[in-house]
Amino acid sequence: MPILQRIPATVALGALFNPLNSSMIAVALVPIATEFDVGIVAVTWLAAGFYLTAVLAPPVMGTLADRIGPKAVFIGGLALVGVTGALAAMAPGFGWLVAMRLLQAFGTCATFPAGMAIVRTVIPGPDGRPPPRLIAVISMVLTSSAAAGPVLGGLLVTIWGWRAVFLVNVPLALLAIVLGWKWLPRVAGDGRRERRLPRPNAALLGTCGQNALVNVIFYLAFIGVPLWAQHTAGVSAGVAGLLVLPMAALGVLAMPAAVALAARAGLRAVLVAAAVLMAGGSAAMFLVGPVGIVPVATALLGLGAAFNQFGLNTLVYVHAERRDTGSAVGLFQASRFVGAGLAAPVTGLLFGAGVTDGGWAMAAITVVVLAASLVLPVKTSDEESPMSD
């Protein structure tokens, strides 16, 4: 494999641990609650705690990568993921499991900002930012691995039990460590001591705020649908995971379309199209009665999530200085979990008896997302981006 393919492939492999583990837990919550005799609301904190930790950790890990070098942070994060995966699988009690879950979140937050700091340095596009197709590939991995989490989790829980959703991290982390050590170049950090935390500009903050709103919608469906399907509709973990499969499959197919639309009409068109698709998915929730209607809603949400992931991820590199890539990407990753953290604690309430309440919440937030898509800056103040309006 050529070196310019090895680096993105390794970064993508490392980056998948965060979205995969953020979503794979959804189908394991009910069996975990049963084994440890805790309530549904309490067990959802396995998801919420992960998300809250992931709000704080990415900017810290990204800033650390900018200062001491991204390769060391990338490898260190993977090592923590592997160790916590093994320890969580052996959890003797619910408290131990929660503790390992929080540490696991910290490890998964290191790989994406550190990896993209390497990519932007080693493989810059003509404008000094990562090439759009490379951003699309990594965005596709992030979206599809998150959406595939419940499917993989459902399979693992059905065959081996809930502990398998943690243990699966061990071999994957070992593989990623080997490839990262072998294939990722060593990029020097700048060693600055006067800037311990990122100082984002208003446009970058707007991009991250939009990402947070999008992910409130995404995770309301993502955690709520499998939880509702098992707890209320009475389907198995495997079937519950399949209900969100369209979010993975269509997300992969949508990414080339997002790249083409951006090249033809600009990033604003991508963001508006994403909001419209998510509005359609939210509206479809009102039609859910039979379980079979759910994949229609999740398909539209998956398409919208893919367009948003590409468009907003691209804007990070439009509005961030190259030397601050790690901290900027970390802030962007954290904003995803601001949204997820807001969604997780209320999923049991919104989806406990049906999906209508969840649909109303998603539709209301989508209106805000659409309005923000029309005003969010899509270029820097001092240059015309080739992918701007």
Image (spheres, rainbow, N blue to C red):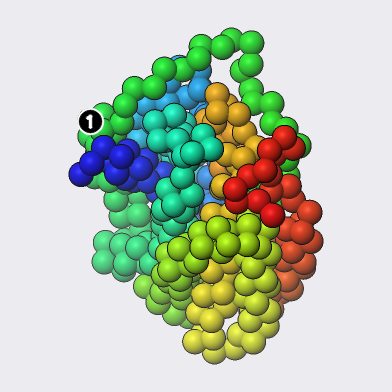
Query: Could you say which is closer to the camera, residue 273 or residue 173?
Result: 273
Label 1 CA crowd tier, 10 Å (few <14, some 14–19, many 20+): few
Residue 121, by quadrant, is top left
Q: Position of residue 192 (x, y in %)?
A: 56, 12
Element class at badge 1: helix
Query: Could you say which is closer to the camera, residue 177 or residue 26?
Result: 177
Figure disc tally: 1
Q: Does residue 69 appear left or right of residue 51 in this picture?
A: left
323 lies above or below 176: above
Residue 87 in view of the camera: no
Where, quadrant-wise, is the C terminus in this rendering? bottom right
Q: Position of residue 234 (x, y in %)?
A: 48, 80
Q: Position of residue 11 (x, y in %)?
A: 37, 40
Residue at the disc numbered 1: 182
Residue 78 in view of the camera: yes
Amino acid type shown at disc 1: Lys
Residue at x 43% of width, y 68% of height: 253
26 lies above or below 103: below
Q: Position of residue 266 (x, y in %)?
A: 63, 57
Residue at x 48% of width, y 57% of height: 143
Q: Does residue 3 appear left or right of residue 49 in this picture?
A: left
Residue 177, by quadrant, is top left
38 lies above or below 73: below
